[in-house]
Image (tube, rainbow, N blue to C red):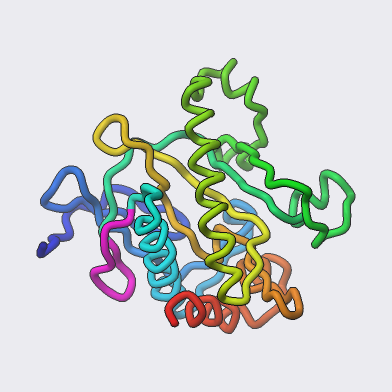
Amino acid sequence: MNWEKGELLYEGKAKKIYATQDPDYLIAEFKDALTAFDGGMKAELSSKGEWNNRISSAIMGYLNEQGVNTHFVEAISSHEQVVKKLKMVPLEAVVRNVIAGSLHKRTGLTEGTPLSRPILEYHWKKDELNDPLLTEDLILALMLASEEQLAAFRELAMRVNQVLGPYMDERGILLVDFKLEFGYFRGDELNVGDEVTPDTCRFWNKEDMAKLDKDRFRRKLGNVAEAYQEVLARVTK
C-alpha cells in the first residue's frame, strides 16, 4: 500500500505520530533525540532515529511472526514505520529479569544479579509525576484497568519476555529488562505498542556485561552511538 503522511497528531520525546489515509493506521517517525529522566537530560544523536526504527521493526516483526500481537505493520523509510492505531492503556509494564536501574536502588541488591523468576511492574504514564510505580491493587482502585485486563497484560508481557529473551540471547545479548506499552486495536485486540529499542530495554553484551542501551547516555558512559549500532547489527544480521 502507498501510505500517505497526513496531519501531525502527536509529538513526544522520541517520535512524531502522523495520520494516514486509513483511520486505523498511523505513521510513526523516529526522532534523533536522546532523552533521560523524563526529559531532564537531552541531546541529539545523528541517525539514532533510523537505528531505532530499524531495531524496533526487526524485533516487533519477529514478535508478530511468533504470534505476539504488536502495532508494527511495516517500515516505509529510514525513520518511519506504519503502525496500527491503538487506544492506549495509561500504564507502562516493565519486565525485569536481572537486578538493574531503579530495582537496584530500591532493593540495594547488586546490579547484575539474576532474578529467580521474571517480575512485572506497572508504572502510571504521567510525566509530571515521573511515571510512579503502582501496585495492581492501586491500579484496580484507581480504575485504570480491570482484573481481566491486568491478567491479559501479564500474559502478553511474559509472552514477549519468553520470545524476546532467547532471540536476544542468540545474538549475544542479555535481556536485562524492558518497558512495554499496550493498546487496543479496533476495540478489543490487545497489542504491544510504542517501540522495542535500546531506549526502552536494557541490553547487555553477554561476554562482558557491557551496556548496549540508553544507560550509556543516562550514566554518561560514552560510546552511545556505537552501542545502538551494535544492537542494530545483531538484530538485522
- Against 234, is 183 above or below? above
Q: Is residue 74 magenta?
A: yes
Nearest to the observer: residue 40 or residue 66: 66
| 109 and 157: which is toward the camera | 157
Q: Which residues are magenta?
A: 72-81
Viewport quadrant of the C terminus: bottom left
Tell me if 69 is positioned left or right of 22 in this view.
Answer: right
- How many marks on residues? 0
Task: Give above or below for 157 relative to 47.
Answer: above
Is residue 8 toward the left or the right of residue 135 in the image? Answer: left
- Quadrant that contains the N terminus: bottom left
Q: Tell which of 223 and 186 is nearer to you.
A: 186
Please provide percent x and percent y for residue 193: 40, 48
Q: Residue at x 70, y 53 (%)?
A: 97
Quadrant in the rendering for residue 142: top right
Q: Is residue 211 found left or right of 108 in the rendered image?
A: left
Q: Residue 19: image x %, image y %?
A: 20, 51
Quarter of the image for residue 136 reads top right
* Magenta stretch secondary structure, dominant: strand
Residue at 52 percent of width and 38 percent of height:
155
- Outermost top residue: 141
**Between residues 84 and 219, which one lies in front from this camera angle?**
84
| Percent coordinates x, y for residue 18 in the rendering | 25, 54
Residue at 37% over, 51% down: 67
Residue at image position (60%, 38%) is 123
Residue 122 lies, in percent from the top left, at 61, 37
For residue 79: magenta? yes
